[in-house]
Amino acid sequence: MLKFIKSQPLIVRGLAIFVPLLLATSSLFFLIYRAQVAAAKDRLVNREVNKVEVQKKLATQRFQEVVADLMILTNQGDLQALGSGLLDPAEAGNALEADVLRQKLITDYLLFSSQKRLYGQVRFLDPQGQELIRIDFDPVQDSSAIIPNSELQNKGDRYYFEEAFPLGQGEIFMSPFDLNVEQGKVQEPYLPMIRFAAPAFDQQERRTGLVVLNFLGQNLLDRLELDIDGAAGQFMLLNSAGYWLKGPTPEEEWGFMFDDRQDQTFAQRYPEVWQVMQADGTGQMETAEGLFIFAALEPLEVIQQVTNRAVQGISQPDGSSYRWEIVSFVSPEVLSALSRRIFAQLLPLYLLVVGVISVATLLILKQMQLATQTQNRIVAGMAIAEKISAGDLTTRLDLGERQDDLNRLLRAFDTMTERLSQLIGQIQASGIQVTSSTTQLASASHQLEATLSEQVASTHEINATTQQIAATSEELSHQVEQVADRVSATATTASQSQQELSQMEQTVRQLVIATDSISNRLGLISDRANTINSVISTITKVADQTNLLSLNAAIEAEKAGEYGAGFGVVAREIRRLADQTAVATLEIEDMVKDMQSTVASGVMEVDKFSQEVNLGLDSIEGITQQITQVIEQVTALDPQFTAINQSTEAQSEGAQQISAAMGQLNDTSQQTAQSMQENSRAIADLNQVVQGFQQEIACFKVSA
């Protein structure tokens, strides 16, 4: 098995070691987890069982307290005396004494109710069922109240009176646990109630009435709903039919009191658990719905045991309908949370152990890897030695960075091989390079011989060409001098044109100034005409007023009769003058309007002319600038043509010098061609020697 593991890859060997250890560790921790969960569940069950037992004891103590209170009230001496007075009302003074005793008992009952706070009603009924004393306690207001005589009722037909009044001395009646009903309806808010009753007797052991305590059941429910440290169960209380007296929600409680809740029972929701409860009475059961811890409580039997008094229910002496089930329900969520908490506690330890196993596996693999690497290095060294003996110097060892003795030996061996390979490689490369160089030299010599022959022919052609260039350069120099003279004349003419354009520009500017002056004067005339218009408007208004006054004067003259005849003539003349003034004013106004129209047209024409003059001025300025640029460019050409002339003369002299030099180059080229022929013969001899050396070292194989 060990040999098989060693022959596998490293990852497979690691898994072969790690996986079995991991499986064993996981199995062990799973068993521990299961044991811890079981132990925690047992502790939870024990706490819930203890809680249920404590709840039974608390209920028993509460019943014992209620029975003790009932017996105290029943055996009061004042109550016995009151009962005797009720049975013998004809005796002298009994009626007055009964009233005094009743008032005293009312005071005692009121104090009793206020101190106890356990009873919704404390009552005393006479043998006919009539309420003689009634004290009501309001748990919301936490106060007791005496019910007046006018509100006392007869309860002779109620079941608890019919069942309790016939009982013997010392016997007790207990009603079922239900909600208080008033006038045929369930009282709201709900008031859970248990009625305890016992008959009262006088000194002659005659029944004188019935003492009734309406025990507030909410006190019992509150006392049973314990908050025990570590207990996670939900408290439930069931009656003998499986209805919730205390349920998961208030809507599911007291289903037997309402027609629309008859199917809301524990028995229907958890039928399997209910069957076990009916069979065993006390125990526990776990289902998919959760964990149920339950204990049966027989109130009648319990009260009889702790008080040594006979207790009777409603026409069922065996008390089977009075059986209660105290249930502590632990939901699946609570059980899951318990498992998760234990898992969370064990997980760090499990991960720590897995980490230790992982580290140990890695250490083992590391040692196995080192042994394998050492063996592989030795085998690799032997293989390389065999290749070197065969002339192969290309293989290298991958030694890493380890510093052990084997690595130092192999590294020295590898260094020797590498240096030997480099030496042989350099020799081979040098041979190849020498061979290549001699070949290239031979080829270059042949090419150079051909090139020199071509060069001799080219020098003859170049010499003839340079002589032609010299003649052409002299002719070009004369032409450049003529062009320079013409450029100077053009520059002089352009300067004269520029002066004439400057004079024209000044004349146009004066014309622009005169045009602006005319436009301003025409504007002044237009303003004066506007002033005349305002005066004419005033004259027109005066003429209208004069005409109106003449009309009023004529009216007054007519009123005066012959006395106003002269005044009427004056009025007509004034009116005629006013009409003439109005007509003249209109004519003047028309003349002024014509003048304004003419002036406005003149202003527009002058403005238009001024704009055209300005445009002409701009054009003249542009032309002046362009002519100035032309003059500058022509002036700049003069020194350039002078420089060209000088360069042409220098070129002519250089062409003559080149012609002389090319003659000398021709002679030198012929001598060089003879030397290259001798070099070609020497290179051929060297190539033969190098090829022989290359054959000798070709048997070695080196890295590239």
Image (cartoon, rainbow, N blue to C red):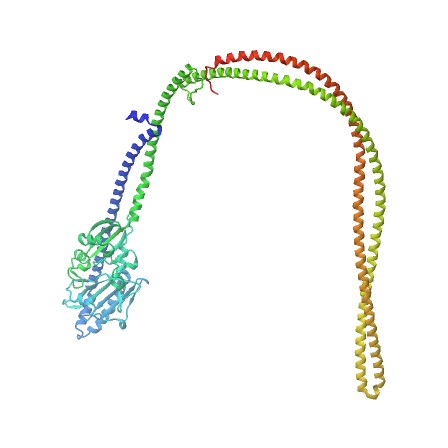
Tell me if 473 is positioned left or right of 314 in this view. Answer: right
Q: Is residue 417 visible?
A: yes
Pinpoint residue 449: horizontal percent, then vertical percent: 64, 16
Q: Is residue 215 visible?
A: no
Looking at the rendering, in which quadrant would you find the N terminus?
top left
Question: Compared with residue 464, is residue 256 higher up or lower down, i.e. above or below?
Answer: below
When asked about the image quadrant of residue 168, the answer is bottom left
- Residues 636 and 316: in front is 636
Q: Could you tell me which residue is drawn at 68 percent across and 16 percent down?
A: 669
Q: Could you tell me which residue is drawn at 79 percent across and 54 percent down?
A: 611
When asked about the image quadrant of residue 144, the answer is bottom left
Q: Could you tell me which residue is drawn at 79 percent across and 70 percent down?
A: 537
Tell me if 36 is positioned left or right of 535 in this view. Answer: left
Tell me if 499 is positioned left or right of 225 in this view. Answer: right
Question: Compared with residue 586, is residue 523 higher up or lower down, i.e. above or below?
Answer: above
Pinpoint residue 353: horizontal percent, then vertical percent: 32, 34
Pinpoint residue 487: horizontal percent, then vertical percent: 82, 35
Tell me if 172 is positioned left or right of 338 in this view. Answer: left
- Residues 401 and 379: in front is 379
Question: Compared with residue 528, is residue 375 higher up or lower down, i.e. above or below?
Answer: above
